[in-house]
Image (cartoon, grey):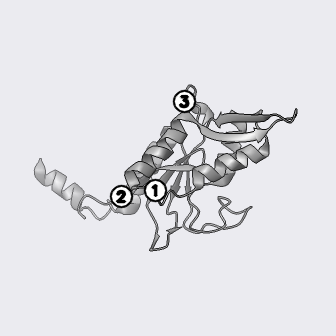
């Protein structure tokens, strides 16, 4: 009945933590690794390898994926690809910037490097394995602090695939 639904929605036990726990359970059932990083330790050997709250790309996980999917590419090209993926596109409107990033994620990140024979090579680095999703790394972070020039925020859940943030969740109890 509608009264039962109303009581359920107003129940103090259905707070935002409960909802986050339920989301965590669902993500874990789907194969995601889930961590609460409210008290994240910073630094190369820290919780996520981030140096600052303003870093939104998890470089440690991204590097691992790029090396795994592009094993014949030198480290310098991997670093170039990482910089391209992490850079802000501030000259474009948000829709244009998002489209450019989408093209990189879907079609690959162009890099140029000199091979062992001294010849210049151009490649597109694979970022994801679309054919076998189990080869990707799925990480959901609860309570991740993120700082920009304008604000400091803590989304309830941010979902990363191979170190790239793709999903942001702000969860609320139904009565709020």
The residue that mark 2 highlights is 171
Q: Identify the secondary structure beneath mark 1.
A: strand
For mark 1, what is the residue?
157
Q: Nearest the camera: 1 or 89?
A: 89
Residue 133 appears in the rendering? yes
Please name the residue that numbered disc 3 is placed on: 130
Disc 3/disc 1 C-alpha distance (Å): 23 Å
Earlier in the chain: of badge 3 and badge 1, it is 3
Residue 90 image point, x, y percent: 48, 60
Q: Residues within 10 Å of mark 1 (few under 14, many from 20)?
A: many
Q: Is residue 121 above or below residue 168?
A: above
Q: Which label's residue is closer to the chain start, 2 or 3?
A: 3
Q: Count residues near mark 2 (Cα–Cα under 10 Å), then give few for <14, some for 14-19, many for 20+.
A: some
Residue 14: image quadrant is bottom left
The alpha-carbon separation of the residues under discs 2 and 1 comes to 8 Å
Residue farthest to the right, as pictured: 117
| Sequence order check, earlier mark of 2 and 1 | 1
Dot in front, 2 or 3: 3
**45 left or right of 98 in image:** right
For the residues labelled 2 and 3, the Cα–Cα distance comes to: 29 Å
Instruction: Report helix, strand or loop for mark 3.
Output: loop
Of 88 and 130, which appears nearest the observer?
88
Q: Which residue sits at x=12%, y=47%?
A: 1
Specify whether residue 31 is in view: no
* Residue drawn where x is 25% and y is 58% of the image: 174
| Marks 3 and 1 close (CB-CB < 8 Å) | no
Q: Quadrant of the C terminus?
A: bottom left
- Report x, y in % for residue 158: 48, 54
Q: Position of residue 51 (x, y in %)?
A: 67, 67
Counting the numbered discs, the total is 3
Q: Are marks 2 and 1 in contact (CB under 8 Å)?
A: yes
């Amino acid at each position: 009945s509608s009264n039962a639904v109303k009581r359920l929605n107003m129940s103090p036990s259905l707070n935002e933590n409960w909802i986050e726990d339920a989301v965590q359970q669902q993500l874990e059932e789907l194969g995601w690794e889930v961590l609460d990083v409210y008290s994240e330790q910073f630094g190369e050997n820290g919780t996520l390898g981030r140096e600052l709250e303003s870093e939104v790309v998890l470089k440690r996980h991204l590097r691992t994926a790029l090396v795994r999917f592009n094993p014949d590419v030198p480290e310098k090209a991997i670093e170039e690809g990482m910089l391209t993926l992490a850079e802000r596109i501030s000259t474009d409107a948000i829709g244009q910037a998002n489209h450019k990033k989408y093209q990189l994620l879907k079609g690959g990140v162009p890099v140029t490097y000199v091979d062992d024979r001294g010849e210049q090579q151009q490649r597109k680095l694979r970022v994801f394995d679309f054919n076998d999703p189990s080869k990707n790394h799925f990480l959901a972070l609860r309570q991740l602090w993120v700082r920009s020039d304008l604000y400091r925020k803590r989304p309830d859940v941010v979902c990363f695939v191979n170190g790239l943030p793709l999903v942001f969740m702000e969860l609320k109890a139904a009565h709020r």
